[in-house]
């Protein structure tokens, strides 16, 4: 029997679980006791130190190039920290239009699988098909259209970009704009990070990306 998704479940599924903005939007869900954050216009973008490097002789790589290089798939680890407390973690993999990931928050872990055939959540050790599936969207697609982009560091193979988006474009509440910091190694996306405000405390969301390596295809789970 198909289950009705909760609002937090729908938010987790909307982008396949990989987008750092999605984690921020849903960090109060999936069993977490953390409050839902709101993006604050002008919030400090990140705590990453920016050190000037020598002038590069080649054009800086772009986020579009990095995302295009991940089209075959990738692994990811996401951590959401409010103040000094880690409130939510998520780990998983994305292969083309399918994803499988685990969300840990509030002392609970929830597994999700998304394929073209449907979207499932594991409850009480049983896979349940969600009755109202969220639209399938490429996990990183919302990041392809920033309203501003700036290279803030180039040092050897490392490039750091600051990208600005309307909060609504990343499904974040509160209006205004948010700044996402992207770390690249040559043309490979290494990490995405940004900071928002939750009840006066800094909320830092960081997602690190790894090559897919040898991985089995992501398929629809069987019952039980």
Image (cartoon, helix red, strand yellow):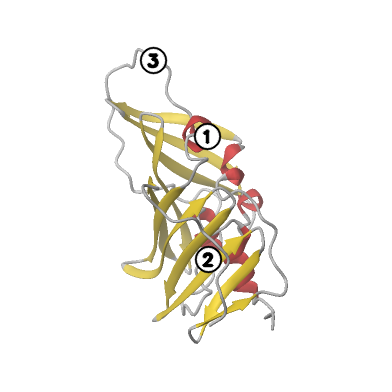
The image shows residue 83 at horizontal and vertical percentages of 35, 66
| Residue that numbered label 2 is attached to | 37
Indicate the secondary structure of the residue bearing disc 3.
loop
| Residue that numbered label 3 is attached to | 58
Relative horizontal placement of residue 77, taking residue 121 as reference (left or right): left
Indicate the secondary structure of the residue bearing disc 2.
loop
The image shows residue 100 at horizontal and vertical percentages of 50, 62
* Residue 159 seen anywhere in this rendered image of the structure: yes
48 up-or-down from 150: above or below: below
Image quadrant occupied by the N terminus: bottom right
| Residue that numbered label 1 is attached to | 68
Of tags 2 and 3, the one toward the viewer is 3
* Closer to the camera in the image, 217 or 104: 217
Dot 2 or dot 1: first in sequence order is: 2
Q: CA distance from mark 1 to mark 3?
A: 19 Å
103 up-or-down from 42: above or below: below
The image shows residue 62 at horizontal and vertical percentages of 48, 29
Dot 1 or dot 3: first in sequence order is: 3
**Residue at left 61%, top 65%?**
11
Q: Are marks 1 and 3 in contact (CB under 8 Å)?
A: no
**Residue at left 69%, top 67%?**
133
Relative horizontal placement of residue 32, taking residue 154 as reference (left or right): right
Relative horizontal placement of residue 200, taking residue 2 as reference (left or right): left
């Amino acid at each position: 029997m198909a289950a009705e998704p909760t609002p937090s479940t729908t938010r987790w599924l909307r982008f396949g679980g990989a987008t750092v903005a999605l984690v921020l939007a849903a960090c109060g869900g999936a069993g977490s006791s953390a409050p839902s954050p709101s993006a604050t216009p002008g919030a400090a973008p990140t705590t990453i130190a920016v050190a000037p490097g020598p002038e590069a002789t080649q054009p800086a790589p772009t986020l579009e190039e990095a995302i295009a290089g991940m089209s075959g798939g990738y692994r990811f680890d996401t951590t959401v920290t409010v103040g000094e407390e880690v409130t939510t973690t998520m780990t998983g993999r994305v292969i083309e239009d399918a994803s499988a990931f685990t969300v840990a928050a509030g002392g609970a872990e929830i597994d999700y699988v998304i394929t073209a055939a449907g979207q499932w959540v594991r409850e009480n050790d049983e896979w349940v098909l969600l009755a109202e599936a969220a639209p399938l969207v490429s996990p990183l697609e919302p990041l392809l259209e920033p309203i501003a982009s700036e290279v803030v560091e180039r040092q050897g193979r490392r490039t750091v970009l600051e990208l600005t988006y309307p909060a609504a474009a990343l499904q974040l509440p509160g209006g205004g704009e948010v700044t996402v910091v992207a770390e690249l190694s040559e043309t490979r996306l290494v990490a995405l990070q940004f900071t928002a405000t939750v009840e006066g405390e800094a909320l830092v969301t960081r997602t690190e990306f790894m090559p897919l390596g040898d991985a089995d295809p992501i398929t629809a789970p069987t019952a039980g």
